[in-house]
Image (cartoon, grey):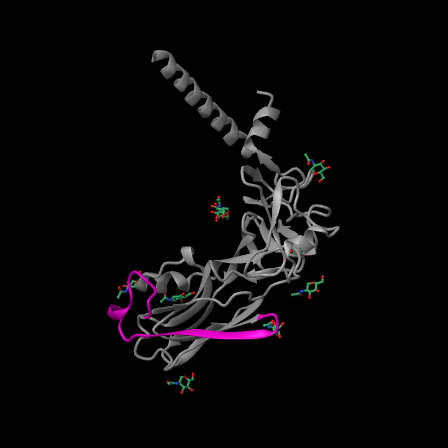
Amino acid sequence: MAALQGILLIIQLSFVIIRVLIVSTTAAAPQALPNCPDKCGNLTVPYPFGMAEGCYQGNDFFVNCSQATDPPIAYLTKNGTVIITNISLAEGELQISDFIARYCYSTSALRTRRNSPVLRLPSPYIISDTKNKFIAVGCDTYAIFKGFQGTEQSITGCMSVCNSLKSVDQNSCSGVGCGQTNIPSGLHNRTMTLDSYSNHSGIWDFNPCSFAFIVEETQFKFSGNTSFQQLNSTTRLPMVLNWAIGDEPDPCDVAKKRQDFVCQNYSKCVNPTNRNGYICQCLDGYEGNPYHPNGCHGDLFKYTTNGK
Ligand SMILES: *[C@@H]1O[C@H](CO)[C@@H](O)[C@H](O)[C@H]1NC(C)=O
Ligand SMILES: *[C@@H]1O[C@H](CO)[C@@H](O)[C@H](O)[C@H]1NC(C)=O
Ligand SMILES: *[C@@H]1O[C@H](CO)[C@@H](O)[C@H](O)[C@H]1NC(C)=O
Ligand SMILES: *[C@@H]1O[C@H](CO)[C@@H](O)[C@H](O)[C@H]1NC(C)=O
Ligand SMILES: *[C@@H]1O[C@H](CO)[C@@H](O)[C@H](O)[C@H]1NC(C)=O
Ligand SMILES: *[C@@H]1O[C@H](CO)[C@@H](O)[C@H](O)[C@H]1NC(C)=O
Ligand SMILES: *[C@@H]1O[C@H](CO)[C@@H](O)[C@H](O)[C@H]1NC(C)=O
Ligand SMILES: *[C@@H]1O[C@H](CO)[C@@H](O)[C@H](O)[C@H]1NC(C)=O
Ligand SMILES: *[C@@H]1O[C@H](CO)[C@@H](O)[C@H](O)[C@H]1NC(C)=O
């Protein structure tokens, strides 16, 4: 009985040791190609993305790490103005920081600041329809959102009207002071326009501005007057894009036969449901970067090659 317990204890202990080894080795998994930088400030830039010649998979995956500021800023593509804030290989996602639309009245009926930002994405990128919402904030506000999927246009919008701060939603975006709607899938560009019904007259003292934006759903929580104040000093908010390799409706069995197929050892090809192209994922039981040569590692493989 004691011997059995002893064996069990040893098994448990070795399990703990193996887990420790696994954790310490995954942290060191290569992200960029050999001799390529893999950080822009605190942003990790994994292959197929890259910041130097020979370090990225085609021009659409070039990240321009501009050192003009401290910390540096990562722009998407060569002539891009889109700022990258996080790159995720698992589902082919990219978090960016995008402009919000606003207009303000300096006194009732005197309109001052106004902008209608445009977002244009190069071909392998679309606005994620699952992670983002389109949101309009204000008490005399209607916001129109136009986007294109290929050559097909989608138009949607939100409105919000309220005549006192008391009536404004405090804990959720549910129609009074804040309205939200889903985003159509597959959009590669978008414009937003804002307008009012009556120049914010009668509400100007507590709500001189209207705002509209696409935002990562988990990154914005509406809370009445606090949101009115915070948005007044916000120029950009996080949004999630999706990307894929190639922009053809490329089932994996076709892609696999091509010379330029990019999924590496111990990875599989996956066709995302909401866009063209394909993404790579490490096989079950493996982890790492499936785009990197020998990037996917199995736990046991690492354990034994560690020489322990
Ligand atoms: C990365 O840097 C940005 C800008 O300096 C900062 O806002 C952000 O919190 C940092 N993220 C992490 C995970 O440190
Ligand atoms: C990177 O972005 C900066 C600032 O927008 C620009 O001046 C520079 O030309 C870009 N560099 C490359 C290689 O695209
Ligand atoms: C960026 O440059 C590429 C060629 O390098 C060009 O095809 C594209 O239209 C440019 N995009 C913008 C937004 O200027
Ligand atoms: C970047 O994305 C990963 C995975 O989606 C997430 O775990 C991580 O917290 C994100 N980092 C930042 C700084 O947002
Ligand atoms: C969005 O894309 C469509 C179709 O490609 C194009 O006709 C339209 O001009 C684009 N809009 C903007 C603002 O770039
Ligand atoms: C809003 O202001 C504009 C001038 O800025 C004026 O032409 C218009 O009549 C006003 N509309 C209302 C409903 O007050
Ligand atoms: C709204 O917020 C601002 C700034 O926090 C504060 O000065 C103002 O009193 C608030 N208004 C109300 C009605 O709570
Ligand atoms: C919003 O910000 C501007 C400066 O950008 C400031 O003049 C104005 O008082 C602010 N309004 C509110 C309601 O906080
Ligand atoms: C991994 O892939 C490389 C080419 O990318 C190939 O040379 C190598 O033999 C592969 N290794 C295994 C274990 O399949």
Q: Quadrant of ligand 8?
A: bottom left
Q: Nearer the viewer, residue 202 or 154?
A: 154
Q: Is residue 65 above or below residue 26?
A: below
The answer to whether residue 144 of the structure is visible from this angle is no
Where in the figure is residue 259, as x and y percent of width and height?
A: 75, 50
Left or right: 138 as drawn, with respect to 70: left
Where 44 falls versus 237 (above or below)?
Answer: above
Is residue 68 found left or right of 10 in the rendered image?
Answer: right
Q: Is residue 201 above or below residue 249?
A: below
Horizontal and vertical percent position of residue 219 = 42, 55
Quadrant of the rendered image containing residue 220: bottom left
- The stretch of residues the image draws in magenta is 149-175
The answer to whether 227 appears left or right of 39 in the picture is left
- The reply to whether the magenta stretch includes residue 165 is yes
Residue 142 shows in this picture? yes
Is 2 magenta? The answer is no
